């Protein structure tokens, strides 16, 4: 891991620690370090800026409330942060009342744009030689694609199934096996 990446992870971990101590400067530190990327991930998943901003705000509220529950031995603070964001985005996508506020033709256009906007090519260009990059390379193509669609693009198993034209059970198996392989490779 590069020194820059190490200090970046440390600063997010330190910010979570500051939040756990009850100091709201930790939230400011997280937002200054990761705010743009958090919003970018949320925009990629939700395709609407208002919903993406809401997801980031809800994520920061969860971080504030649960910072004392974070344990470094279970994973990086940055991973914890993005997991909270991904889950929040998925909850927003499941909440049809937000999406039905759009006229049906705009909703269809938004959902089509989300499907088309996800490209999995180029995952290899992760900066430097990272363990994650090496571990992703070790997965078979279908498992890697399923993992990236689920955990980077935020698609549900059903959406991945439709996109890849395979049964949902197959997608679930690919994701499960790939997560086990990644966990083993990264530990």
Image: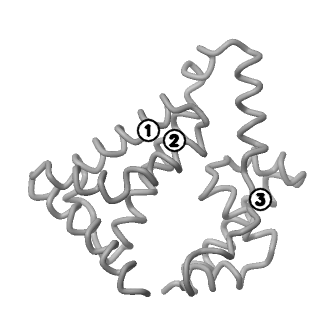
Q: Which residue is mark 1?
A: 55
Q: Residue at horizontal 81%, vertical 69%? A: 142
Q: Is residue 17 left or right of residue 23?
A: right
Closest to the observer, 61 or 114: 114
Q: Is residue 65 left or right of residue 2?
A: left
Q: Residue at horizontal 48%, vertical 86%? A: 187
Q: Residues within 10 Å of mark 1 (few under 14, many from 20)?
A: many
Q: Are marks 2 and 1 in contact (CB under 8 Å)?
A: yes
Residue 154: x %, y % from top left: 61, 49
Q: Earlier in the sequence, mark 2 or mark 3?
A: 2
Q: Residues within 10 Å of mark 3 (few under 14, many from 20)?
A: many
Q: Residues within 10 Å of mark 2 (few under 14, many from 20)?
A: many
Q: Earlier in the sequence, mark 3 or mark 1?
A: 1
Q: Which residue is mark 3?
A: 171
Q: Which residue is mark 2?
A: 89
Secondary structure at numbered mark 3: helix
Q: Residue furthest right?
A: 165
Circle number at residue 28: none
Quadrant showing the N terminus: bottom left
Secondary structure at numbered mark 2: helix
Q: Is residue 57 left or right of residue 131?
A: left
């Amino acid at each position: 891991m590069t020194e820059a990446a190490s200090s970046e992870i440390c600063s997010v971990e330190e910010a979570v620690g500051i939040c756990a101590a009850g100091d709201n400067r930790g939230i400011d530190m997280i937002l200054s370090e990761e705010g743009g990327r958090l919003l970018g991930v949320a925009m990629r998943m939700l395709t609407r800026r208002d919903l993406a901003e809401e997801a980031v705000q809800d994520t920061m509220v969860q971080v504030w409330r649960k910072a004392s529950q974070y344990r470094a031995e279970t994973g990086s603070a940055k991973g914890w942060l993005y997991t909270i964001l991904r889950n929040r985005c998925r909850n927003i996508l499941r909440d049809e009342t937000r999406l039905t506020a759009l006229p049906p033709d705009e909703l269809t256009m938004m959902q089509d744009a989300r499907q088309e906007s996800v490209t999995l090519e180029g995952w290899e260009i992760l900066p430097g030689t990272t363990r994650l990059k090496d571990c992703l390379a070790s997965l078979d193509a279908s498992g890697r694609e399923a993992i990236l669609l689920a955990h980077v693009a935020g698609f549900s198993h059903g959406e991945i199934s439709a996109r890849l034209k395979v049964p949902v059970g197959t997608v679930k198996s690919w994701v499960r096996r790939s997560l086990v392989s990644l966990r083993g490779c990264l530990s």
